[in-house]
Image: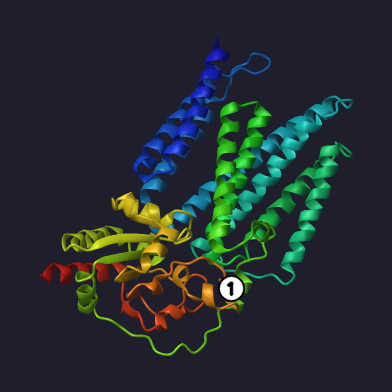
Amino acid sequence: MGNALLQLCYLIGSITFIMGLKMLSHPDTARKGNLVAAAGMIISIFGTIFLFRSENAEHLHNYVWIFAALAIGTVVGTMAAKKVQMTAMPEMVSLFNGMGGACAMLISIVEYRRVMDIVAATPSYVPETGKMIVVVLGMLIGTVSFAGSMIAWGKLNGRIKDRTIPGGQMINFVIFAGLIILVAIVVGGFFPAMPALFYGILTLAALYGVLFVMPIGGADMPVVISLLNSFTGVAAAFGGFLYNNPVMLTGGILVGSAGTILTILMCKAMNRSLKNVLIGSFGGAKAVAGGAAKEQGNYKEISVSDSATLMAYAQKVIIIPGYGLAVAQAQHVCHELEKVLEEKGVEVMYGIHPVAGRMPGHMNVLLAEADVPYEKLLEMEDANEQMGTTNVVLILGANDVVNPAAKEDPSSPIYGMPILEVEKAEHVIVNKRSMKPGYAGIENELFFRPKTSMLFGDAKKALQSLVTELKSID
């Protein structure tokens, strides 16, 4: 009876994971989807704690440790989620993703030690090849995800700078080859009583995770976060295989497959190949090399009053949100600007680039927080189709995703990356704090074009001033 109830709990958990993921595909249902998936997780956890029985019909024990860990994790997770600013959300995602990889790594270590205890007690025992493959690969992938996510977290919050190691790509290849050899040796059982080989894989995997992410430039970080997230999902799925746990397996497969699909979409949006992502050969060094400034001429500055007048008498305005909007926490006043313009009969839409911000969907989440209708968020292709009939484009803290060098300059590190083609509009207003380059570290030629005017200042203050000016225009 207990086992049947446990399997029912796992079935409910698996179904809610699938339902939750489906609901996450739309902002209107995303919050409910999170709650549905969380409810399924809670059912699965408590079902495991109270209904699980081992092969010897023994229940779980150490309830004090189990519930203490649950309590600590719940408190820490809740406090972190409540306090985190939207600008810090990408690094929080990276940190939590790393914790998932660490869990998968620790599960594999525990299971490997259990196998070694059996080998020590029964010298004639030969570990199952299939189980050893799952244990070793789960540990390897989880370790890479953990180490890489920690570096990504450090780079996103500014604690770790981009570092290009001489011969780094060759070093990565050597480490990867060493990992393959060690995995083959350990899985093949050639030296079953030598844990040093297993921990050698652990060490090399951690080193590979660090070296894999370290040289990658900030502009490519959304792809890295998505890829590492898929790694964590795959590692969790291996844990599901180990424990014959269907809900853990389902969750891991969902995360792994969704992360992989998202990574491919991100690569397409940034004109990167998945192969280049996997071998860590893109980003930092290239961006620095391509970031040399060249004579651009003079830029044209515009006042708040003139900006408000342009938009007030426009028929269509497209707003391009970027990381600067998130830094200023200006999403709510941006929504207010949108409503004021619509009261004046102006059609207002938002152009969303797939990699705007610091992680996939960053701008969508930011605007959803301010209750911007989802129907107003245009994907890049749809936004580009409407640029030709747009009177004013207002760019708020975005840089690389509107840089014409991606289409015009073959020497640029972002050449070939699809961009929002804002130059098709009649007027382009760019709000930035200064003329400093964006996250990719390269100059933006758009700022010096005839159609472009610069509106300097903090995004929130600039938008508040625009709203005030617009309200004063009859």
Query: How many numbered circles does the render carry?
Result: 1
Q: Position of residue 200 (x, y in %)?
A: 78, 49
Residue 400 relative to residue 117: left or right: left
Residue drawn 29% across and 53% down?
370
Which image quarter is the C terminus in?
Answer: bottom left
Q: How dense is the environment of label 1, judged by Cα within 10 Å: few (below 14), some, or many (20 and up)?
A: many
Residue 305 relative to residue 451: left or right: left
Question: In the image shown, does 453 or 332 lie closer to the viewer?
Answer: 453
- Report the colour scheme: rainbow
Query: Which element is circle 1 on?
Result: loop
Which image quarter is the N terminus in?
Answer: top right
36 w.r.t. 419: above or below = above
Could you say which quadrant of the image residue 376 lies in?
bottom left
Residue 130 relative to residue 235: left or right: right
Q: Position of residue 436 (x, y in %)?
A: 44, 78
Could you say which quadrant of the image residue 164 lies in?
bottom right
Question: In the image shown, does 157 or 71 lie closer to the viewer?
Answer: 157
**Residue farthest along the top direction in this orientation:** 1
Tell me if I can see residue 441 in this picture: no
134 w.r.t. 124: above or below = below
Residue drawn 60% across and 70% down?
284
**Residue farthest along the left direction in this orientation:** 474
Tell me if I can see residue 442 in this picture: yes
Residue drawn 39% across and 89% down?
298
Q: Position of residue 70 (x, y in %)?
A: 48, 33
Q: Amino acid at mark 1?
A: Pro
386 w.r.t. 429: above or below = above
Q: Which residue is mark 1?
A: 413
Q: Position of residue 417 (x, y in %)?
A: 54, 67
Residue drawn 80% across and 41% down?
195
